[in-house]
Image (cartoon, grey):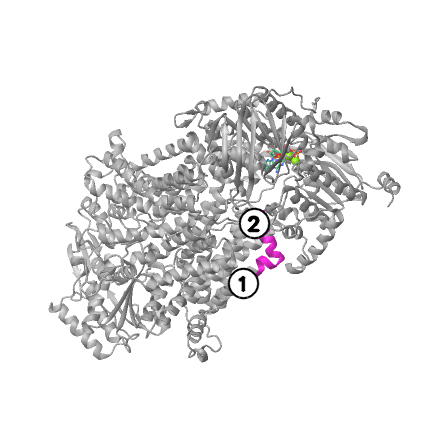
């Protein structure tokens, strides 16, 4: 029986964890199988949850988030017969761990292109939850994409805050959105958890476009959300669960090529993305996949060529 | 900084200051009556949740507002029960109420809507929208006054105007009515009120109820006017900031408004000007994020001086045991 | 109304108040036990009793502040339920509490109308009250500024406000709980004139006091309470102070201070041109020079609020002043430092025992070291020597007859008199070279007064200098070897007790210059 | 004699009770027990309301928090955090300072501990622990010193300034972790792992030599002993030393302190510094003992729970100790509940709220009728 460990945000965070939940649910529905799940309560429990599942014979154990890396390196060696899957980690050296990381910068690059193309003002916005490397990573890809379309594009980037409340403060998200609008932004990309709800809402209220993140959030405000940067955590979880105990270990990066990231198109935003825009983005996507276009990762040397933090 | 930017920052300040102001005035009634209240945060949160939930279910924001007020007043009643009837420790009761609201809102939301502790998004009549004041459009063209009126003064939700009106109303109630006189007296010396033949318990419960009412509006404003739905912990510490503003204002209504506006302005500025570049150096976002708090401390230390709380505040009124 | 009809009514009419079988317990403490009393209309009825005898409790029950466990109340012959003060007020009862029930940062007017407003808006009631107040003031000669803030006026004025409060509510029955404890003789005289007038108007007055002189002077009847019971009620004309004292305490009490003439030695404390400015920037002490010699008691008389408190506080190190202070010839820093003062051999019985002299939540034994907690006796290294403290406390309690003699009891659980004994014991037993004493017997019953006075005289006889500040002229006259009168931050003059009297001192206290006096 | 002390402390916290009506055992055991029971009943009703089985929930909580050495290991780990922050609030309370800044002080204390662990080559964990206590304490104290100084000298209300300093601490830590302490290329906003030399022995390692097989997985570590020692030290400080005497005197009466020559400025500064140091020392448990690196939001609100712990413990170290264990139990038991049932984790918060409410704020509701019963019984007898 597989197990799934959600990160602190909780499984209904409308993005990262919820995507994992959806993947697991899809697996359960298709196979009729059951899985066990828990939501983290505190940092100290990460190890606890891992051990408890491992002890109880769950296999594989799917865990979410980079914060699991550390506890995993302590626990995994103790249970060599158990397979662990960790999302958003790619730097561990453990034989029984499948590490899946996403090329968020690639997906963000594409939505950045869309943003710059959809923008009439030549100014696009980015709102991150907290100033942490992962969020910079998102912002960096986005900025590169926007600049690729329009080298003169102005990118307004903001972070919500520095306490955990930063991820759950839609009111602040709203105000940041308004502040960015007043600085000319007419497309805003939110990578800020619950705060993003406020960004998308206000963007819709104020009549500008927004871009969702992680899951497809286009449906939240039909016709007002330009697109969503998809991070197919659901796919990663689904695949891992489907593979079951025989899941392949090692480091896997899910980029555009692997369909691990992408941009969402559905009936809600069909009218917003013109064929011309789509063609351009698909072109870039193809180039990234074949390697002729390289999107710089913020992680490579903790800096971004297109945006300074 | 051009004129329009200033207007926009002020506009944002007003929105950010409104929930603070309502909560701050709420605390003012309670604390002026001698009941300290660190549970403002919890009451706002409960109101934010229930108003959004009821608005989502009924489609009427007014019913939502009522429900939010009711939620907040129930918690107020609990605070009154603990600190007035049973003469418990007011700080403990406030802490408990914050915990209770934080847990129950998500618990109930999850049980009710199964959307991860959120309410569904509100739209249409389930939400407060901005009011366009008379002549706003007509006047917009007039230099200076026009934009100020159209951009800054007009266009807010009705709750904002309510909050602003609550300031002179509070002043008037406090200093010009019998109720206000008694309210202030019971926070300074409940024995004087008691021996004057007035019920201390009744007065204090009335104060606590008003506190619940205003906190309820503050919470409803967050989830149905500023936002279109409830998200867990969405008050994000605003109750504590309101408390700080109350002390800052030395428990006076007009000063409370200025204190809340100050917090609003500082935050609006910090939000607007993240990542300022000074030549080669970029001021880190964290510095701007901390700036409102640093400035508050500086202002407090530099200009405000000692704040003296209502003398009977925090102590239960015990005649005999 | 003629005197004849009045006295006739006194004999025949129903009592203004009749209490029957009142009992009241606070937890395990039986404060009132089966008390019955009748108070005739148009009389002043005195109630005396030791600290904690239950006087205040009984009156608070009558005023609806406390609820009796058992018993009945009759007002003008009619059985009346008094569940709260509102009921008492409607029954025509007004009460001036021992500890005033005023809102300190309100104005006089606001305090007076609180609870007796006309209508929901203040403007109208304030205006109406103002006119009525002016009339009441004029009628009874109780003038106060209606717009003065309570905490800025003296206690005497505050008491007037309390009386005005009751009159404003048309009280027919007025209860006064230790009203003169904080008044100057002139103020007390004036109060009694007002009470006399009220009696003449047919109002009924109950007066609680520890001062037998007042009982003899003004009351018609007097009741004595002891340990929660009413032990006697007598006609004032048919009793004597000695008899009352004995009824109260249960033994013979010496009502006069018995002391030998002073044998003053070298100056211990010398003060030159001391000036003190308070927090509000007001100069409270305006250049005082004085000295106190070994073996003498210098009494400082004066109406409260004329700088005596500030003088004591500077000498005790509680606040800063400017000027030259010398202790046994050594110059002292006029800045605030209580520890340094104690090191110089100065002990200090502060004016307000509950605010300053004691920590009310501390056990008695912790309070016995208060201010001296760094002394070698009470410490061991960085720790307190609690065992030594407790032993010392038990011994002091025995020597000073503190009741109950339980070192573990919190200070707030002692009655005022016993609290004061703890403070006095602590300070006197330091064997100080100089003892500062402020209001040593405020609110203390006569048994304890006698005892405290004896201790102060004994200390003087042992060669210490004593600086006594008191608003009680009796106390000043009977304890002091030399008297200085303070008015408006200055010393108006010095007198020897044998060569002056209350009238002369009273004039000096009122600011009349020496020449005029 | 000691028991009397505790009662004295209860007075300080609850505003003073006077003459005893109830026997001590009733006051100390019966009242809290009934209050807890009421909280439990209400919690059970809430659980029922969301369609779960309260009996199973209680069993799971008790088992999960107390049922094994593993469970105890977690309970005690959380309790250790709460002891430090609870003591911090309690010490300040005695000087009548309401230090809401424990969260920020613990955060900055964590920075101190991280720096000490990362940049000093400690030869042995015991020295490292001493160094970390020193560094964490110093950093926490420093963070408390500014609000304390502002209160003492400028009259700036310590409640506001400490709230503000919590936010400022979060910003500072965020900046430092992301821009300075984070190892290059790491995707995690956290410091590097501390060297093996400063690994603190867990209870497993500590108890193994005694032949006790304590769970290896649980994070409780030697910091627990430090926390208990801190309880004892704070007790001695407050109730035995001259400084403690002065702190309590100042806290109860400012004019009284002035009379006795106790400097208010000095007491404010010292009590807040001690308070901040205690909060800062929490980091030896969560940062050094558990995570072994500094992560964002390492404090996880323990600073705020410290307020509840101090209030419930009536500001007495022994009370704080018990309340910390109770909260540790609720935290761990509740976590287990959320981990293994469908009951959302917010249920813990609700249970905590009810416990705080009934044992802390509504205790007179239980005490008053009990007192009446005892009084009647006593009258009946005597
Ligand atoms: N509020 C109270 N709660 C508990 N016990 C009280 C309270 N007030 C008074 N007592 C108890 O009742 C007894 C009577 O107190 P009371 O104040 O009536 O005495 P008193 O005669 O007025 O004394 P004094 O002369 O000092 O004013 C006291 O000994 C005390 O133990
Ligand atoms: N609220 C209370 N709770 C318990 N006991 C009280 C309370 N108020 C007063 N007492 C007790 O009542 C007794 C007398 O109280 P009271 O205030 O009348 O003292 P007092 O002798 O009049 O002192 P003072 O002269 O300072 O007024 C004391 O023993 C005190 O412990
Ligand atoms: Mg009395
Ligand atoms: Mg008295």
Q: Position of residue B44 (x, y in %)?
A: 45, 58
| Residue C47 pos. (x, y %) | 73, 34
Mark nearer the N terminus (1 vs 2): 1
Asked whether, in this view, residue D221 is left or right of residue C486, the answer is left
Depth-wise, is mark 1 or mark 2 nearer the camera? 1
Query: Residue, x 43% and y 47% (percent of image)?
Result: D154
Location of residue D243 (image quadrant): top left
Residue annotated with mark 2 = B187
* Viewer-side residue, C147 vs B7: C147
* Residue C112 vs residue C59, the one in the foreground: C112
Residue range corresponding to the magenta coloring: B172-189
Labelled disc at residue A101: none
Which residue corresponds to mark 1? B168
Give the answer, above or below, for where D87 lies relative to B174: above
Q: Is residue B186 magenta?
A: yes
Q: Residue C88, how many percent across, how many down?
A: 71, 46
Q: Which chain is home to disc 1?
A: B
């Amino acid at each position: 029986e597989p197990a799934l460990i959600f990160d602190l945000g909780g499984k209904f965070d409308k993005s990262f964890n919820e995507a994992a939940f959806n993947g697991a649910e899809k697996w359960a529905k298709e196979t009729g199988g059951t899985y066990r799940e828990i939501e983290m309560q505190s940092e100290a429990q990460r190890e606890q949850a891992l051990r408890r599942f491992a002890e109880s014979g769950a296999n594989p154990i799917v865990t979410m988030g980079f914060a699991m890396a550390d506890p995993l390196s302590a626990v995994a060696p103790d249970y060599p017969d158990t397979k662990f899957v960790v999302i958003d980690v790619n730097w561990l050296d453990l034989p029984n761990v499948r590490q899946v990381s996403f090329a968020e910068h690639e997906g963000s690059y594409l939505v950045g292109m869309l943003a710059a193309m959809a923008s009439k003002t030549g100014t696009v916005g980015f709102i991150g939850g907290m100033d942490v490397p992962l969020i910079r990573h998102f912002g960096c890809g986005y900025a590169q994409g926007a600049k690729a379309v329009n080298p003169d594009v102005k990118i307004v980037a903001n972070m919500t805050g520095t306490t955990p409340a930063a991820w759950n403060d839609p009111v602040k998200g709203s105000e940041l959105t308004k502040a960015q609008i007043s600085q000319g932004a007419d497309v805003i990309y939110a990578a800020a958890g619950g705060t993003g709800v406020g960004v998308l809402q206000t963007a819709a209220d104020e009549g500008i476009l927004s871009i969702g993140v992680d899951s497809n959030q286009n449906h939240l405000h039909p016709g007002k959300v330009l697109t969503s940067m998809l991070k197919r955590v659901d796919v990663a979880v689904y695949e891992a669960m489907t593979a079951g105990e025989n899941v392949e270990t090692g480091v896997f990066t899910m980029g555009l090529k692997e369909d691990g990231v992408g941009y969402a198109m559905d009936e809600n935003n069909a009218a917003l993305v013109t064929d011309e825009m789509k063609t351009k983005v698909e072109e870039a996507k193809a180039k990234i996949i074949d390697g002729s276009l390289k999107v710089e990762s913020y992680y490579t040397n903790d800096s971004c060529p297109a945006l300074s933090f | 900084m051009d004129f329009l930017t200033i207007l926009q920052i002020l506009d944002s300040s007003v929105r950010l200051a409104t929930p603070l102001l309502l909560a701050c005035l709420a605390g003012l009634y309670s604390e002026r009556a001698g009941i300290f209240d660190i549970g403002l945060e919890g009451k706002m949160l409960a109101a934010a949740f229930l108003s959004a939930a009821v608005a989502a279910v009924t489609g009427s924001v007014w019913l939502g507002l009522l429900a939010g007020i009711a939620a907040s007043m129930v918690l107020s009643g609990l605070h009154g029960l603990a600190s007035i009837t049973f003469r418990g420790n007011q700080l403990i009761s406030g802490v408990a109420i914050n915990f209770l609201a934080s847990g129950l809102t998500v618990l109930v939301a999850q049980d009710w809507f199964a959307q991860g502790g959120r309410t569904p998004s509100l739209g249409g009549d389930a939400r407060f929208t901005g009011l366009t004041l008379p002549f706003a459009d007509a006047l917009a063209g007039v230099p200076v006054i026009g934009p100020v009126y159209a951009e800054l003064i007009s266009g807010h939700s009705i709750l904002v105007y309510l909050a602003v009106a609550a300031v002179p109303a509070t002043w008037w109630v406090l200093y010009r009515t019998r109720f206000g006189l008694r309210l202030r007296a019971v926070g300074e010396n409940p024995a004087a009120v008691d021996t004057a033949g007035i019920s201390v318990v009744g007065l204090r419960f009335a104060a606590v109820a008003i506190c619940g009412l205003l906190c309820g509006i503050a919470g409803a404003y967050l989830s149905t006017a500023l936002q279109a739905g409830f998200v867990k912990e969405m008050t994000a510490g605003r109750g504590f900031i309101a408390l700080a503003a109350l002390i800052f204002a030395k428990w006076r209504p007009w000063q409370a408004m200025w204190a809340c506006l100050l917090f609003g302005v500082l935050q609006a500025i910090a939000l607007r000007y993240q990542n300022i570049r000074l030549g080669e150096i970029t001021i880190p976002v964290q510095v701007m994020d901390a700036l409102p708090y640093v400035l508050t401390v500086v202002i407090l230390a530099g200009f405000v001086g000692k704040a003296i709380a209502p003398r009977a505040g925090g102590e239960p009124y015990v005649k005999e045991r | 109304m003629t005197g004849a009809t009045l006295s006739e009514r006194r004999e025949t009419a129903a009592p203004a108040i009749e209490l029957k079988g009142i009992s009241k317990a606070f937890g395990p403490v039986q404060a009132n036990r089966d008390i019955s009393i009748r108070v005739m209309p148009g009389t002043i009825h005195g109630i005396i009793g030791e600290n904690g005898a239950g006087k205040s409790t009984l009156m608070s029950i009558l005023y609806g502040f406390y609820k009796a466990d058992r018993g009945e109340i009759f007002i003008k012959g009619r059985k009346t339920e008094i569940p709260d003060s509102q009921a008492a007020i409607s029954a025509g009862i007004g009460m001036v509490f021992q500890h005033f029930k005023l809102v300190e940062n309100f104005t006089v007017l606001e305090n007076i109308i609180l609870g007796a407003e006309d209508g929901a808006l203040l403007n109208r009631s304030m205006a109406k009250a103002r006119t009525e107040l002016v009339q009441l003031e004029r009628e009874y000669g109780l003038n106060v500024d209606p717009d003065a803030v309570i905490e800025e006026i003296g206690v005497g004025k505050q008491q007037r406000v309390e009386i005005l409060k009751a009159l404003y509510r048309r009280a027919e029955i007025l209860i006064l709980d230790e009203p003169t404890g904080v008044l100057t003789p002139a103020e007390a005289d004036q109060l009694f004139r007002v009470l006399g007038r009220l009696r003449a108007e047919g109002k009924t007055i109950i007066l609680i006091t520890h001062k037998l002189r007042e009982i003899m002077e003004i009351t018609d009847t007097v009741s004595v309470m002891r340990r929660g019971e009413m032990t006697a009620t007598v006609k004032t004309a048919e009793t004597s102070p000695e008899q009352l004292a004995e009824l109260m305490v249960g033994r013979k009490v010496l009502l006069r201070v018995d002391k030998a003439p002073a044998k003053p030695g070298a100056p211990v404390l010398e003060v030159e041109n001391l000036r003190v400015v308070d927090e509000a920037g007001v100069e409270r002490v305006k250049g005082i020079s004085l000295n106190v010699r070994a073996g003498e008691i210098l009494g400082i008389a004066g109406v409260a609020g004329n700088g005596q408190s500030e003088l004591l506080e500077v000498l005790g190190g509680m606040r800063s002043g400017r000027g030259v202070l010398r202790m046994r010839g050594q110059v002292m820093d006029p800045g605030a430092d209580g520890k340094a003062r104690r090191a110089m051999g100065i002990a200090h019985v502060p004016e307000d025992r509950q605010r300053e002299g004691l920590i009310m939540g501390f056990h008695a034994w912790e309070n016995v070291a208060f201010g001296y907690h760094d002394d070698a006796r009470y410490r061991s290294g960085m720790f307190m020597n609690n065992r030594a403290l407790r032993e010392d406390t038990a011994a002091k309690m025995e020597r000073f007859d503190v009741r109950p003699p339980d070192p573990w009891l919190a200070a707030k659980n002692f009655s005022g008199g016993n609290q004061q004994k703890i403070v006095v014991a602590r300070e006197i037993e330091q064997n100080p070279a100089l003892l500062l004493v402020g209001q040593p017997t405020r609110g203390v019953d006569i048994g304890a007064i006698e005892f405290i006075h004896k201790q102060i005289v004994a200390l003087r006889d042992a060669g210490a200098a004593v600086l006594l500040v008191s608003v009680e002229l009796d106390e000043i006259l009977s304890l002091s070897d030399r008297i200085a009168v303070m008015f408006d931050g200055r010393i108006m003059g010095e007198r020897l007790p044998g060569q002056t009297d209350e009238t002369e001192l009273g004039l000096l206290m009122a600011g009349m210059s020496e020449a005029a006096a | 004699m000691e028991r009397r002390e505790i009662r004295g402390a209860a007075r300080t916290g609850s505003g003073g009770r006077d003459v005893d009506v109830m026997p001590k055992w009733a006051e100390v055991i019966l009242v809290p027990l009934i209050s807890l029971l009421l909280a439990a009943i209400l919690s059970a009703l809430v659980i029922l309301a969301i369609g779960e089985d309260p009996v199973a929930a209680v069993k799971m909580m008790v088992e999960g928090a107390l049922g094994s050495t593993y469970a105890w290991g977690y309970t005690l780990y959380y309790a250790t955090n709460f002891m430090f922050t609870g003591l911090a609030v309690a010490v300040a309370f005695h000087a009548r300072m309401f230090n809401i800044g424990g969260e920020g002080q613990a955060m900055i204390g964590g920075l101190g501990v991280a720096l000490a662990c990362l940049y000093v080559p400690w030869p042995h964990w015991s020295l490292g622990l001493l160094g970390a206590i020193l560094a964490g304490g110093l950093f926490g104290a420093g963070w408390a010193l500014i609000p304390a100084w502002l209160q003492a000298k400028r009259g700036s209300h310590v409640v506001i300034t400490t709230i503000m300093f919590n936010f400022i601490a979060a910003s500072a830590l965020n900046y430092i972790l992301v821009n300075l302490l984070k190892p290059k290329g790491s995707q995690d906003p956290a410091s590097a792992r501390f060297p093996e030399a400063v690994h603190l022995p867990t209870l497993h390692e500590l108890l193994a030599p005694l032949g006790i097989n304590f769970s290896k997985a649980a994070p409780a570590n030697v910091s627990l002993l430090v926390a208990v020692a801190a309880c004892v030290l704070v007790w001695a400080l407050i109730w035995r030393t001259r400084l403690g005497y002065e702190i309590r005197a100042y806290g109860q009466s400012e004019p009284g302190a002035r009379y006795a020559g106790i400097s208010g400025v000095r007491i404010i500064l010292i009590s807040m510094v001690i308070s901040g140091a205690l909060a800062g020392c929490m980091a030896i448990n969560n940062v050094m003992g558990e995570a072994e690196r500094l992560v964002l939001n390492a404090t996880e609100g323990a600073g705020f729970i410290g307020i509840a712990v101090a209030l419930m413990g009536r500001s007495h170290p022994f009370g704080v100790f018990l309340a910390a264990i109770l909260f540790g139990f609720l935290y761990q038991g509740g976590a287990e509940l959320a981990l293994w049932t469908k009951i959302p984790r917010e249920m813990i918060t609700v249970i905590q709220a009810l416990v705080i409410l009934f044992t802390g704020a509504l205790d007179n509701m239980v005490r008053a009728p009990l007192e009446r019963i005892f009084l009647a019984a006593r009258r009946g007898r005597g």
